[in-house]
Image (cartoon, rainbow, N blue to C red):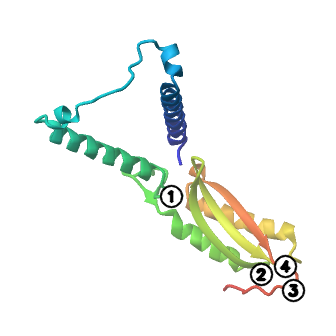
Amino acid sequence: MRRSILAFDRVLVLLLGLVLVVLGVAAVGWQTGFLGSVWPDVPDEVSVDTGEITGASGFAVLAGVAGSALVVIGLCWLIAHLPRRSVGSLRLPSGEQPGRLVVDPGPAVATAAEVLADDPLIRSARGAVLADRGEQVVRLRATVDPDADLGAVVAACDRVLADLAHVLPADQLRSRVELSVLRRGEVGPRVR
């Protein structure tokens, strides 16, 4: 979720909370008589003629427009809160020919994970491209045996990421490798 949406949510919830607290305190103060000592002109009762409001000729149109606006605002708010972790196409550096070059990073990252999984030190590997805190991140998840040489595993991961940097625009991506170590005696499937 974007920071602007989080900030908007926090401000909106703070204001809504303050309004509800003030209305709640005013309602309790009105019933107990405390509000009358603070605000001497407070009415003893409130009477509203709803027929005058709902009987107006434009009430149905106004209610329909207000209801539609609330539905649209609610849907936009819900859609803004949907997690979007996938990344679309990335723009490649322009060459000598005019035009725009883009690449879909998914297949390249999947191939990089397959290359990493082919390494004898790696049991299995998966890859994905995610949007994480405003950054586009290549995430490789690899599973290794407990007796694997960690330095060699890191070197294999570095080689794969270096090859991937030749295919994808490295200035637009960050990389993260997550290693899972099998427990001793656990037999994990060898993915080929």
Between 34 and 185, the one lying in front of the other is 34
Q: Is residue 86 found left or right of 112 in the rendered image? A: left
Q: Between label 4 and label 1, give the one nearer the viewer.
A: 4
Identify the disc placed on residue 183: 4
Mark closest to the chain's N terminus, 4 or 1? 1
Give coordinates of residue 82: x percent, y percent.
Answer: 48, 55
Mark drawn on residue 185: 3
| Quarter of the image where one finds residue 47 | top left
- Lower sequence index among marks 2 and 4: 2
Residue name at image x 60 percent, y 60 percent: 166
**Comparing labels 2 and 3, the label whose residue is closer to the camera:** 3
10 Å neighbourhood of mark 1: few (<14), some, or many (≥20)? Answer: some
Kind of residue sitting beneath label 4: Arg
Q: Which residue is mark 1?
A: 87
The residue labelled by disc 2 is 120
Amino acid type, residue under disc 3 in the picture:
Gly
